[in-house]
Amino acid sequence: MWILIAALPIGMFLGLIAGGSFTNLRSLSLRVWYLLIPAFAIMSLMAVDRNPPAEWLLLPVALVLFVIVAFRNVAIMGMTIVGVGILANLVPVLINGEVPVRQKSVIQAGLANETNIDLVRLGAGRRFEEQGDYFVTLGAIIPFEPVKEVLTFGDLIVAAGLINVGFRAIKPQQRFRQDDEADNPAVTLAEALGIDPIDPLPASVPAPAVSAAPADPELDDAAPASSDADIFLDDLPDVVHGSATWGE
């Protein structure tokens, strides 16, 4: 449980190292945050009381509340991962009533040995794996000996998501283009290709002058007069076999 609590501060600390700032938390808006109050209250009760009243109902309700908060805030980077991890923990609870715990994993985590494994008391919402349980692979089967914990795959996913949330809360992801260039697709495309955009010519630069070709007096003399051109056209047939026609 402490790993999940520490995941968010770890992500925030990494964000500070990467150049982030706590001032970025002002832009963070958490929807339906009030659902976290009963969810954390239930988890706190189950942490101090191994046999709370309505134990079969408390854990599923708390997990559902966490899922709702996670998926209502998918706009926050990392929240989708958190929601997937919580769902992974919720599935075996709904199917089996509690989280199945593998005895071998408890021994590997250093919590007990083969002689006193029967004396181990699990926390609320957990019980040892039994024959006929479903989705056991989503139960507590991952020993973590350094802290003497047995985790689920969902716990690891939630921890990774919370680290991501904390990191991006302190150091938000920068947008690809600036606001003043958002309406200029040519500049944006040039930046994407890694080249400098071509600046238009300033208005003060005059357009290049086009000089007319000098008149050739010999050609002018060879040009037929307008009357000769009319006679030449009159001598053509009405229809010319080919790709064009003349006359009506």
Image: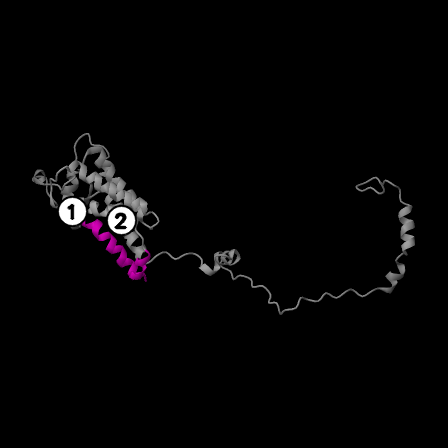
In this figure, what is the number of numbered marks? 2
Q: Nearer the viewer, residue 29 or 133?
A: 29
Q: CA distance from mark 1 to mark 2?
A: 17 Å
Assess disc 2: are there few (<14), some (14-19) or many (≥20) residues with their C-alpha within 10 Å of its C-alpha. Answer: some
Assess disc 1: are there few (<14), some (14-19) or many (≥20) residues with their C-alpha within 10 Å of its C-alpha. Answer: few
Q: Mark 2 highlights which residue?
A: 33
Q: Residue at x 66, y 68 (%)?
A: 206
Residue 120 placement, left or right of 229: left
Q: Residue furthest bottom?
A: 204
- Image coordinates of residue 60 in percent, x first then y, are 21, 38
Check whether the beta carbons of the residues at disc 1 and disc 2 lie within 8 A of each other. no
Residue 99 visible, this orientation: no
Q: Is residue 118 above or below residue 231?
A: above
- Magenta part mainly helix, strand or loop? helix
Q: Which residues are magenta?
A: 1-27
Q: Mark 1 highlights which residue?
A: 44
Q: Earlier in the sequence, mark 1 or mark 2?
A: 2
Q: Nearer the viewer, residue 71 or 113?
A: 71
Q: Residue at x 19, y 34 (%)?
A: 97
Q: Residue at x 31, y 53 (%)?
A: 29
Where residue 21 sits, quadrant-wise, is: bottom left
Q: Tag 1, which secondary structure?
A: helix
Where residue 244 sits, quadrant-wise, is: top right
Q: Tag 2, which secondary structure?
A: helix
- Image coordinates of residue 248 in percent, x first then y, are 85, 40
- Image coordinates of residue 124 in percent, x first then y, are 14, 41
The label shown at residue 237 is none
Q: Residue at x 47, y 61 (%)?
A: 180
- Image coordinates of residue 178 in percent, x first then y, are 44, 59
Indicate yes or no whether the magenta region holds residue 23.
yes
